Image (tube, rainbow, N blue to C red):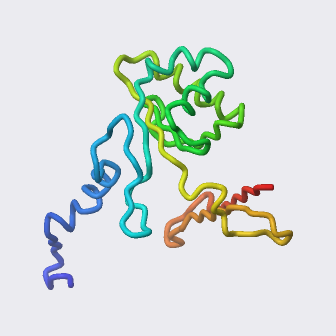
Amino acid sequence: MEPPDGSWSASVTEVLGEFLTALVVNRFQLRPKGAHAPRVLLDDLVICRESWRIPVAELEAAARKPGTLAAELAARGVPRHLFARTPAEPKPFYVDLEAPLLVRNLQRAIRLAAAGEGLCLDLGEMLPGPEHLWLADQDGGQCTAEFRLVAVDEAEPQTVAMTAMTDTRRS
């Protein structure tokens, strides 16, 4: 409620709450990063996906030779479908170790990250994987879908309002 004199007051947590949330939300970790961390389950709920942290220097040679990076990662127990994150690209990106173009993207990311010392490649299993898709198209084929929507405050003039729908089908 607004005070009768027109002044405004709020607690510090009210004023700084969203800012503090934005700062800490992506830093939250249930466990420290390690060379390999198994999947953590609470009953059937996945709390942490299986992950690997590999020094970029250990993969640099494989990233420079065509056809060796996927084999090197498979030898370390990394699954076919995963998400990768490098210091040069902090947003995770999808990698299918049997898709040459996606492996090439990973090789490029490793080469870019190789310029720094002591940097690591973070890999995480894709979960659920393609074999667990439950959404079917009209022909019975398995697929995934993502629906994104941008909300617009109509009180403020906007130049562009966008909605996007992407559909990735699996044959």
Residue 52 in the image: x percent, y percent? 43, 38
Left or right of 11? Residue 149 is: right
Measured along the vertical axis of the image, is residue 59 above or below residue 2?
above
Residue in view at x 51 percent, y 21 percent: 112
Q: Is residue 128 above or below residue 83?
A: below
User: 66 or 86, which is in the foreground?
Assistant: 66
Give the camera-side residue of 47 and 12: 47
Q: Residue at x 48, y 44 (%)?
A: 124
Residue 152 drawn at (x, y percent) = 54, 67
> In the picture shown, does residue 46 fall above or below 101?
below
Most extreme residue toward the right is: 139
Nearest the viewer among 73 and 10 is 73
- Rendered-image quadrant of the N terminus: bottom left
Vertical position of residue 1 compared to residue 140: above or below: below
Residue 69 position in % (x across, y down): 59, 25
Check the picture and name the quadrant holding the C terminus: bottom right
Residue 150 picture quarter: bottom right
Observer able to see residue 142: yes
Compared across the picture, whether 43 is left or right of 7 comes to right
Is residue 28 visible in the rendered structure shown here?
Answer: no
How many numbered tags mark residues here? 0
Give the x, y percent position of residue 130: 66, 55
Residue ID at (16%, 71%):
10
